[in-house]
Each structure stands twice: as C-alpha cells, then as structure tokens.
Amino acid sequence: MDTMEIFYALFSGLPRCGPGSNTSTRKAFSLLPPLPPNPKVLDIGCGPGMQTLELARLAGGTVTGVDNHAPYLEELRRRADLAGLSGKIETVRADMTALPFPEESFDLVWSEGALYIMGFEKALSEMRRFLKPGGCLAASELVWLTASPSPGARDFIETEYPAARDIAANCALFEKAGYEILGRFTLPEEDWWTHYYDPVSVRLDRFEREHAGVEEAQALFAAVRREIAVFRSDPESYGYAFFVARKR
C-alpha cells in the first residue's frame, strides 16, 4: 500500500474529509435567494458526501456530486440509498479542472473546502462558467482570522497553504470574478472536531500501529497529528469561512 492509498484509507468511511457540519451547510443554504423549481445543483469535491445528502434534502432538485476518488462516490451512493435520497443524487467521477458539463447548466454550484485544489481564485472564475444566469456559488475556504496569528499558526499555514487570504481578500476575489456576495460566515470551532478531527484522531492510533516501521506512512500520520495540534493550540488565528455569492 503506497502513501496515497494509506492516506485515502485513513479518511475512508469518516463523516467528512474536512471541517464542516450539516448546521453550517444549512446556514449557508439559508443565505441563497429562492431557487427555481427542481434546481440542478453541482457539489464539487464532494468526498463521501455528508453535505451532498443535506443539499438533496434542502434543494428539492437533483444534486450531482463530483469527486476524483471512486471509493468516496461509492460511499456517497451507499449513504444516499440508506437515507432514501438515491433518486435525488447523481455521482460523477471527474477532476474539477476538467468538468464534463455544459456551460450554464446548474442553478447552484457548491463546494465545501475543496476549491483550494484548483486554486481558489482560479476556481471562482472556472465555476462561474457552469452557472446559469443569476445562479449562485457557495464555497468554504481556509482563511486567516487575524492579522497577527501566532508564530505556530503562521508557520504551519504559510508552509501548507501559502495562498491563504483573509475574509476581505476572498470577498474581493468573488467581486473580481463576477459575483455579488450575498453573505458569509466563519465556521464554528466545533465544525473542525465533531465530524473531522475527533474521528481522525481515534483512527490514527490504529493506523500507526498497523503501519509501524513504514517510514512514509509514519511521516503522513505525524503531519496529520501536527495539523490537529496546531489548530487545537490556536483556533483563533485561522479557520474556514463560508461564502455565498450570485453570478452577476
């Protein structure tokens, strides 16, 4: 098992692959204007799809979940079946940089913590192409919450995600890309723990034992533990912000 396989195994079956919650998904959805009947929704980087299921409940139309990791999509389909939502959810395996959809084909594009993969600024322009006139984009992104972060937080974020900006700078990116900001909020600290860091931490103990002596795997586990420790020590320097915007 190579490092990427171990990485996917570590996060496989977890509620989420990043910070968030159904409460925050609902809060972001509440900032949207009324959607048309039977809206078409696109969830980019859906992972195992906790938010995809919630979107299907909220939107009342069809939600297309896109991810490049097939087991995540299989998990989403399984969860949709159990929730009685399989008729409202479609899955597509694709890279977000090469989405196989016509332009202006969705009423709402959604992405929780995934657009950084493409580069947030580039992703805003790219996702706009898939929105119908007046369609909306809702996305969460890692942001600086203070101009004076702790040295530990600054070192970690500048190493792992040097493109991080503050909320105002991200709002400016939306405006530049042709959107009108409808609302935004910062995810609560609980969103990092309940469905993400807490279950990952429990699993790390087992994975470290199972892969004892595998240098690459242990380096991966140490990096995840460091990420958790940095946020635990300073949750006020950085976090995730949810932005909701409408295509101009």
Image (cartoon, grey):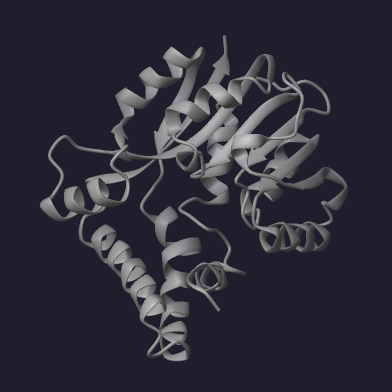
Q: Is residue 190 above or below residue 245?
A: below
Q: Left of 131 or right of it: where is 153?
A: left
Q: Is residue 61 above or below residue 130?
A: below
Query: What's the residue at 18%, 52% (across, down)?
Result: 155
Q: Is residue 90 above or below residue 11?
A: above
Asked if residue 32 shows in the view, the reply is no
State which quadrant residue 39 falls in.
top right
Q: Left of 14 or right of it: where is 204?
A: left
State which quadrant residue 205 falls in.
bottom left
Query: What's the residue at 32%, 67% (across, down)?
Result: 223
Residue 154 placement (x, y as % from top left): 18, 48
Asked if residue 93 shows in the view, the reply is yes
* Residue sitting farthest toward the top: 248
Residue 111 placement (x, y as % from top left): 57, 39
* Residue sitting farthest toward the right: 87
Residue 6 placement (x, y as % from top left): 52, 74
Query: What's the residue at 50%, 62% (across, down)?
Result: 195
Residue 216 placement (x, y as % from top left): 39, 76
The residue closer to the viewer here, 215 or 93, is 215
Total numbered circles: 0
The residue closer to the viewer here, 28 or 148, is 148
The residue closer to the viewer here, 110 or 125, is 125
| Quarter of the image that includes the C terminus | top right
| Quarter of the image that includes the N terminus | bottom right
